Image: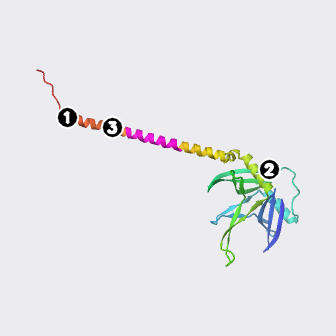
């Protein structure tokens, strides 16, 4: 763990950024008098709030001890930094489907990330904040602000971990696979339409047969009865 940009915000509050395995969690809060550490939350454009960071008590104790000691970082961990992927679900937006996931690095879980396998794009958690406009400078509106960020090398590590952990999802989103899926979907739709037409035709045939039988019986009842006489 590395503590970056530790600064006082008044009223006993300190803010800092926390680097874990190359991923930086921005705008964490620390209250020294209460020994309390708060990780940032994220908001969407509708004001809904989501958790971004989760970790167990042991990691929080290590971070608190690091802050109280005045040191900027823990001793370097020489062990390989593995990224554990936790798949969540697929979100359809526009032309592409986004694969939502969480991942764990050095005991900290980063929640609410997105991956687009077809383009390789990865979006780490962001929050939307409302800014009041200033006349002549900029208009009021929501602005997207990163909550977690990382440099290219660490994003590439995450992309490789996703491809390893979710090879089926990665394969499904290649251009060739998408064409094959579209072709299979078209064939399935045409087959379903043909089956429906066949079922409808058979239903009409079953309805028509009783009607014809009833009509024949009615005609026979209306014909005069002929009696046979022996000469």
Q: For mark 3, what is the residue?
A: 210
Q: For mark 2, what is the residue?
A: 82
Q: What element carries label 2?
A: loop
Residue 53: name its quadrant.
bottom right
Query: What residue is at 48 percent from the left and 41 percent from the top?
Result: 194
Tell me if residue 146 comes above or below residue 8 in the rendering: above
Query: What residue is at 13 percent from the left and 24 percent from the top?
Result: 229
Q: Is mark 3 on a helix, strand or loop?
A: helix
Mark 2 and mark 3 lie on one chain; the one further toward the N terminus is 2
Q: How far apart are marks 3 and 1 (CA)?
A: 21 Å
User: How packed is label 2: few (under 14 Cα within 10 Å), some, or many (20 or more)?
Assistant: some
Give the prevailing secondary structure in the magenta stretch: helix
Q: For mark 1, what is the residue?
A: 223
Query: What residue is at 69 percent from the left and 47 percent from the top?
Result: 170
Residue 226 image position (x, y, % from top left) = 16, 29
User: How packed is label 1: few (under 14 Cα within 10 Å), some, or many (20 or more)?
Assistant: few
Identity of the residue furthest to the bottom in this view: 135
Tell me if residue 219 comes above or below residue 174 in the rendering: above
Between disc 2 and disc 1, the foreground one is 1
Residue 68 image position (x, y, % from top left) = 85, 65
Left or right: 31 in relation to 42: right
Q: Distance between the residues labelled 2 and 3?
A: 72 Å
Residue 77 image position (x, y, % from top left) = 87, 53
Q: What stretch is highlighted in magenta?
A: 189-205
**Rendered-image quadrant of the N terminus:** bottom right
Left or right: 153 in relation to 87: right
- Whether residues under marks 2 and 3 lie with C-beta atoms below 8 angstroms apart, the answer is no
Between disc 2 and disc 3, the foreground one is 3
């Amino acid at each position: 763990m590395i503590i970056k940009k530790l600064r006082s915000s008044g009223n006993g509050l300190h803010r800092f950024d926390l680097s874990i395995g190359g991923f930086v969690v921005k705008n964490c809060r620390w209250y020294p008098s209460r020994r309390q550490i708060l990780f940032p939350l994220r908001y969407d454009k509708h004001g809904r709030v989501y958790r971004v960071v989760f970790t167990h008590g042991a990691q929080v104790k290590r971070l608190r001890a690091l802050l109280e000691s005045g040191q900027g970082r823990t001793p370097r961990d020489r062990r390989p930094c593995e990224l554990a992927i936790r798949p969540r679900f697929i979100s359809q937006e526009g032309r592409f489907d986004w694969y939502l996931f969480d991942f764990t690095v050095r005991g900290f879980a980063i929640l609410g990330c997105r991956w687009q396998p077809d383009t390789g794009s990865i979006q780490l958690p962001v929050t939307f904040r409302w800014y009041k406009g200033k006349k002549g400078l900029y208009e009021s509106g929501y602005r997207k602000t990163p909550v977690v960020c990382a440099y290219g090398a660490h994003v590439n590590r995450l992309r490789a971990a996703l491809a390893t952990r979710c090879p089926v999802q990665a394969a499904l989103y290649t251009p060739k696979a998408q064409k094959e899926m579209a072709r299979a979907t078209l064939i399935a739709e045409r087959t379903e339409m043909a089956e429906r037409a066949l079922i409808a035709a058979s239903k009409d045939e079953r309805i028509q047969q009783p009607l014809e039988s009833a009509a024949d019986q009615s005609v026979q009842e209306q014909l005069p009865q002929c009696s046979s006489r022996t000469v």
